C-alpha cells in the first residue's frame, strides 16, 4: 500500500454499520490498524445517531440491517449532508435493488465477502472526494475558491492573505451564503470569548474589503452581513 495513502488514512474516522457482529468486529479490528478510529453500529438507527454525534469522514454500511436498513440510513444522512462519502455493502446482485442505493450518491457498493484490498481502493477514491469537498467555490463569484483544509483563499489562483479573525469571518459567510449572518453569530463564532465592539467589527470588514479583489461583502445596517 502506498505510503501517502497510509498517512492519509491515519486521519480518517469511519462509521461502520453491520448487524452481523462477527463480520463487524473482524473488519473493524482490521481497519483500526490503518485509520484514526472506527465507530461501530449494529443497525441503521444506531448508525445515524453516531453519525450525528461523531461526524465521521466516511460511512461504510451494510444494506440489510434491523430497525433502519442501509438505504434508509443513507437517505436520512443525505437530507442534511450531500457530501460525506458512503460505501454500501451488499450480499445481493439484484440490479433493481442496488439502483435505489446508487441514487443516494454512493462512492461505490461492495459485494460480500469484503476484501480489504478492494476496500482500500475505495477509500482512496473517498479521500479524493473529501479533499475536493474541502475546496469551496463562492456562489457570488466563481473566481473565489476557499480551501478549508489549508485555510487559504484564492482569487483567480492568486492567494489572498487573511489573518485569523478575517478567516473566521469569511468562513462564517461561506457557510451561510444564502442568508444574512447576524451580529450575534459574529460574536459567538468570530469573537467567541472576546467582546465584539462596533469599531472592531467595522475595522475587520474594512480591512477585509481592501484585501479582496472585488466588493462581495454587504452590510445590512442593524442586522448583519452577507455576500452581495
Image (cartoon, helix red, strand yellow):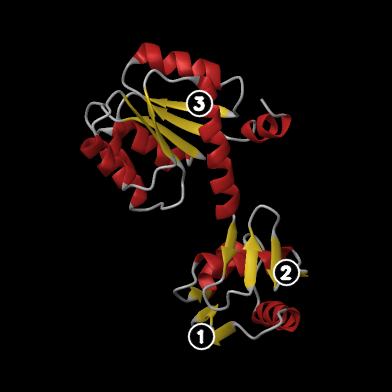
> Does 215 sit above or below residue 95?
below
State how far apart marks 3 and 1 are (Cα). 56 Å
Task: Choose mark 2 or mark 1, whichever is in front.
Answer: 2
- Local SS, label 2: loop
Instruction: Identify the residue at the far bottom of this view.
Output: 221
Q: Residues within 10 Å of mark 2 (few under 14, many from 20)?
A: few
User: Between disc 3 and disc 1, whose residue precedes?
Assistant: 3
Task: Choose mark 2 or mark 3, whichever is in front.
Answer: 3
Task: Choose mark 3 or mark 1, whichever is in front.
Answer: 3
Q: Which residue is mark 1?
A: 222
State how far apart marks 2 and 3 are (Cα). 36 Å
**In the depicted view, which residue is nearer to us: 206 or 217?**
217
> Residue 37 shows which numbered tag?
none
Q: Which residue is mark 2?
A: 157
How far across and how far down the image is residue 218, in percent? 56, 85
User: Between disc 2 and disc 1, whose residue precedes?
Assistant: 2
The total number of labels drawn is: 3
Q: Is residue 21 left or right of residue 5?
A: left
Q: Give the quadrant of residue 133.
A: bottom right
- Local SS, label 1: loop
Q: Which residue is mark 3?
A: 118
How far across and how far down the image is residue 214, in percent? 67, 84
> Does 104 sit above or below residue 135?
above
Amino acid at each position: 500500500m502506498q505510503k501517502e495513502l497510509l498517512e492519509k488514512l491515519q486521519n480518517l474516522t469511519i462509521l461502520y454499520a453491520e448487524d452481523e457482529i462477527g463480520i463487524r468486529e473482524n473488519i473493524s479490528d482490521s481497519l483500526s490498524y490503518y485509520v484514526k478510529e472506527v465507530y461501530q453500529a449494529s443497525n441503521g438507527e444506531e448508525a445515524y445517531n453516531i453519525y450525528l454525534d461523531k461526524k465521521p469522514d466516511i460511512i461504510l454500511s451494510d444494506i440489510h440491517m434491523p430497525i433502519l436498513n442501509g438505504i434508509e440510513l443513507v437517505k436520512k444522512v443525505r437530507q442534511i449532508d450531500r457530501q460525506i462519502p458512503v460505501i454500501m455493502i451488499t450480499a445481493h446482485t439484484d440490479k433493481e435493488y442496488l439502483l435505489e442505493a446508487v441514487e443516494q450518491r454512493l462512492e461505490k457498493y461492495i459485494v460480500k465477502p469484503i476484501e480489504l484490498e478492494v476496500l482500500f481502493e475505495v477509500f482512496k477514491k473517498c479521500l479524493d472526494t473529501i479533499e475536493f469537498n474541502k475546496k469551496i467555490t463562492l456562489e457570488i463569484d466563481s473566481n473565489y475558491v476557499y480551501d478549508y483544509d489549508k485555510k487559504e483563499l484564492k482569487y483567480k489562483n492568486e492567494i489572498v492573505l487573511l489573518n485569523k479573525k478575517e478567516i473566521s469571518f469569511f468562513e462564517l459567510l461561506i457557510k451561510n451564503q444564502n442568508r444574512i449572518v447576524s451580529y450575534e453569530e459574529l460574536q459567538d463564532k468570530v469573537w467567541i470569548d472576546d467582546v465584539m465592539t462596533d469599531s472592531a467589527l467595522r475595522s475587520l470588514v474594512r480591512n477585509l474589503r481592501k484585501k479582496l479583489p472585488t466588493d462581495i461583502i454587504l452590510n445590512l445596517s442593524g442586522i448583519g452581513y452577507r455576500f452581495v
